[in-house]
Image (cartoon, rainbow, N blue to C red):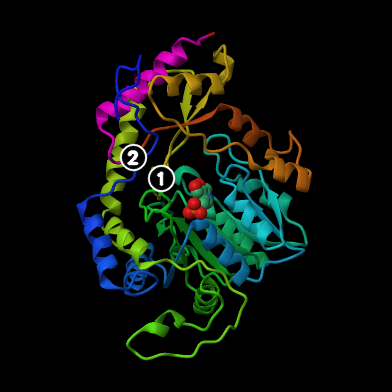
Amino acid sequence: MKPEKNQDRYFLPFSRPFIGEEEITEVADALRSGWITTGPRTKRFQDYFRRYAGSSHALGVTSCTAAMHLSLIAMGIGAGDEVITSPITFPATANIVVHCGATPVFVDVEPETLNMDVSLLESALSPSTRAIIPVHFAGRPVDMQTVLDIAQQRGFAVVEDAAHALESWYRGSKIGSGYPELGKWSFKWSCCFSFYATKNITTGEGGMVTTNDEGLADEMEVLSLHGISRDAWKRYSEEGYRHWETIRAGFKYNMTDIQAALGLVQLRKVERLWKVRTELFSVYDEAIEGLDEVVPLKREVPEGRHAHHLYVILFRDEMLDTTRDVIMNEIQARGVGIGIHFRALHLHPFYRDRFGFRPGLFPVAEDASRRILSLPLYPGMSKEDVERAAGVLRDVVRSHRR
Ligand SMILES: Cc1ncc(COP(=O)(O)O)c(C=O)c1O
């Protein structure tokens, strides 16, 4: 890409997938193999992923959205049920609740992490509550102990939105493992990951759902491929034609071997890429130190680990003479891509109109919506790229000091 006029350097994108020759070779091998939909590579990817996450089952699907939808349907969530989640999330987290015929219920977030404030959970419960979807925002684990305890006491299901949290740990348990170190849990549980193009590892589009419940795993597998009997994907294999039957009104959510080929190679790199992003986080920390108008989200995870998916800052707007949107546009105009994760979901038109959510209901989330910004972050960035992004931020913010 050529630099734009008046732009001294190339545009620094907000995100860029980290794809090498190994991924290209593996995808080409999958294409040449003659088996391009769900097949042996998907099975292998699921197997490696299960081991990485520490769960007994893993199912490859088309997205994290599909993983969460399948989870709720397989757990029997439906009309009349309420599902609790965070308003600081991607729409998919609540959309899938609506797709089940259930009602999303939001609880406000903690100001320093923007994760669900679990101290508010009790106040959001009703006789119709059936499930909780904690969102590990930016890669920082939610305070799961409280979520697990409430789910255990009341028999609610837990579906984790771990789209940002592939490498996260919470109190000695890997996110995706089901927290065996923290207790013996008998409620329905699953954990959902995203391999979207901007995520920590990518399959272009794709996702994975882990669980430790064999019955739930079987049900999700059947539902992920039209609701036809298990292993129907083998119906064209050399094992001979098998009759299959429709046992559920299922979905088309199965992962393909082309996606799995990418995923297999990306998963081998997952910890290395995490280390690279961790170093880039430190470069940002150093580069914006002393810029008082900007506060990075709290990241320390006692006895755990942050996945370092998004480098998120909050502007202290009382120290600035303009809005986040003006600053954001000026940063972009100077050749640095940015993201907004997220503007509180309850005030998006669909949720406002359909469920009657109004401003003021979740003040912390609403306040953060106006002040939040994500800076570019991906393993292909150099230290100089990070310093350049931070430098542009610093210049723009200084020009708007009150
Ligand atoms: C918090 C969160 N949940 C869910 C999703 C949906 O993931 P996918 O695109 O894989 O369906 C995203 C995607 O950006 C996300 O950020």
Is 221 drawn above or below residue 103 in the view shown? Answer: below
In the shown orientation, is residue 280 left or right of residue 307?
left
Element class at badge 2: loop
What percent of the width, then of the height, locates residue 53?
Answer: 38, 63
* Rendered residue at 50%/11% (across/down): 400
Quadrant assignment, res 251: bottom right
What percent of the width, then of the height, locates residue 341?
Answer: 52, 38
Q: What's drawn in magenta, residue-wise?
A: 379-401
Which quarter of the rendering shows the C terminus? top right
Q: Give the residue pinned by disc 1.
A: 198
* Rendered residue at 40%/14% (across/down): 395
Which amino acid is tagged 2?
Answer: Tyr
Which quarter of the rendering shows the N terminus? top left
Element class at badge 1: loop
Q: Give the residue pinned by disc 2.
A: 378
In the shown orientation, is residue 73 left or right of residue 207?
right
* Rendered residue at 40%/50% (across/down): 304
